[in-house]
Amino acid sequence: MRRLAGAWPGPCPRAGSDSVGAMPDSGYPWPISTTRLDNGLRVVVSEDRTAPAVAVNLWYDVGSRHEPSGQTGFAHLFEHLMFEGSLHVAKTEHMKLVQGAGGSLNATTNPDRTNYFETVPAEHLELALWLEADRMGGLVPALTQETLDNQRDVVKNERRQRYENVPYGDAWLRLLPLLYPPGHPYHHATIGSMADLNAADLATFQAFHQTYYAPNNAVLTVVGDTTTEEVVALAEKYFGAIPPRSEIPPAPDGRVVPATGVPMAETVVTDVPAPRVYVAHRTYPFGTPGYDVLTVLATVLGSGRGSRLYQRLADGERIAQPDLVGAYGVDLAHGPAPLIATATARPGVSGERLAAGLAEVVDELATVPVTAAELARAKALLATAWWRQMSTVDGRADALGRYATQFGDPATVAERLPAWLSVTAEQITEAATEVLVADDRVTLTYQPEEKP
């Protein structure tokens, strides 16, 4: 392979490796190996020779839950800044190099993490790893006030376009403060506040990056047409000389949210085409047995035409628009994750009527047992979605990075699908009785404003 200019200098540290082979009948029947470099970077490799492509996925253990007061939106802003040049890569060159090599790339931020990822032809693996290493260790020296101001404006416009100036767009911004009290790490949305983004100076942003974007706070995952030996050698070559961060401040503990015993409700009268209602409950953290049950429960409740919400509100009582009714869990791992059910009213149906119907269907999960047909249907939908993600190298790389970051072991990814498939109807009833209670419910209702 051609040595790329700009590799991090210095000798490569030794690394220790621990290989794990997942069972063929598990939810991940491909080999997995994990290596930790001396600077703390964990390198996860899963070989798959069926196509000449590799997916590179870098998970940083930093999301909006880590943001101190006054710095909301920082993790998401860095999702943008990390594409704006680094020590040896000019502004916009990261995208040009990957796309010019026939690859694709993107990044996402949520409350729990930030991830950056590329899928490239296998012969360009070294390029992808060099680019990721350069912006891990070389973004701060290249970060200028002009770049910061430009991307700060981009994020502010994103907030306006996605949250503030579209019907129902600010629902997530409103639900989070209703679900989680002030001071809880999930209280604020990833997009952050305009005031915090405007107030921070260049030095504050540089300090945030130097605190969290370190090799010992990251997991590098590579899946596809390569070997563990090749990936580890390249990781040592390009990431090995990046120093670790000695002290990375932990996020606030969000595992306990006291039940208020009082339902929370908010009604928003604004320019929307029809009433819409969100009913939300705090449940269990993602990755726990309780949340596995809630995942199946949510599928029974609100996934597709066979779900209870669709059958009752769209087909039966005909108070909800058929394509705008559903339920889902938000997979947050470090606190009680929310389950959200939502419906949009048909013409002539009031928000109050819709909210009552939505709550009634949710309440019945504790009193009307899930049938064998409902359970089988939900498990089939979940299995299909799981294998759809696992069918691609980029889907597998993201999953392995997640389980390594959030649970310490990428091989635990193989446990998720069997956990869903083992859920019983009795467990669903028990979970509904425990967490889907009316006295601890959040209801957000949008009402169309009256027009002359």
Image: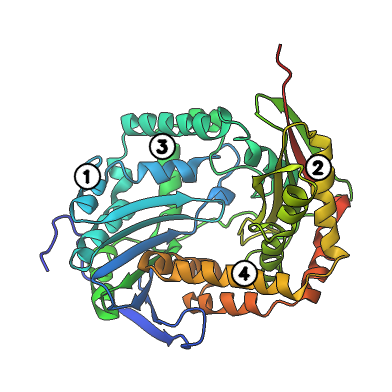
Label 1 sits on a secondary structure element that is: helix
Label 1 or label 2, whichever lies nearer to me, is 2
The residues tagged by marks 4 and 1 sit, at their Cα atoms, a distance apart of 37 Å
Mark 1 vs mark 3, CA separation in Å:
24 Å
| Numbered disc in front, either 4 or 2 | 2
Image position of 425 with respect to 82: above or below: below
Quadrant in the picture for residue 448: top right
Residue type at mark 2?
A: Ala
Counting from the top left corner in percent of width and height, residue 370 is at 78, 70
**Tag 4: Cα neighbours inside 10 Å, few (<14), some, or many (≥20)?**
many
Residue 262 location (% of width, % of height): 88, 46
Mark 4 highlights which residue?
A: 287
Quarter of the image with the N terminus in it: bottom left
Which residue: 48% across, 72% down?
Answer: 387
Disc 3 residue type?
A: Ala
Residue at the image position 32 percent from the left and 53 percent from the top: 105
**Which of the pair 93/299 is nearer the observer?**
299
- Whether residue 122 sits left or right of residue 330 in the image: it is left
The amino acid marked with disc number 1 is Glu
Q: Is residue 214 left or right of residue 237?
A: right
Q: Which of the two labelled residues, at mark 1 and mark 3, occupies the earlier sequence position?
A: 1
Decide which of tag 4 and tag 3 comes sooner along the chain: 3
Q: Position of residue 54 (x, y in %)?
A: 29, 68
- Name the image quarter holding the C terminus: top right
Q: Residue 181, can we see it?
A: no
How many other residues sit within 10 Å of disc 2, few (<14), some (14-19) or many (≥20)? many
Mark 4 lies on a secondary structure that is: loop
For image coordinates 69% across by 42% down, the residue present is: 175
Q: Which mark is residue 355?
A: 2
Location of mark 1 (residue): 93
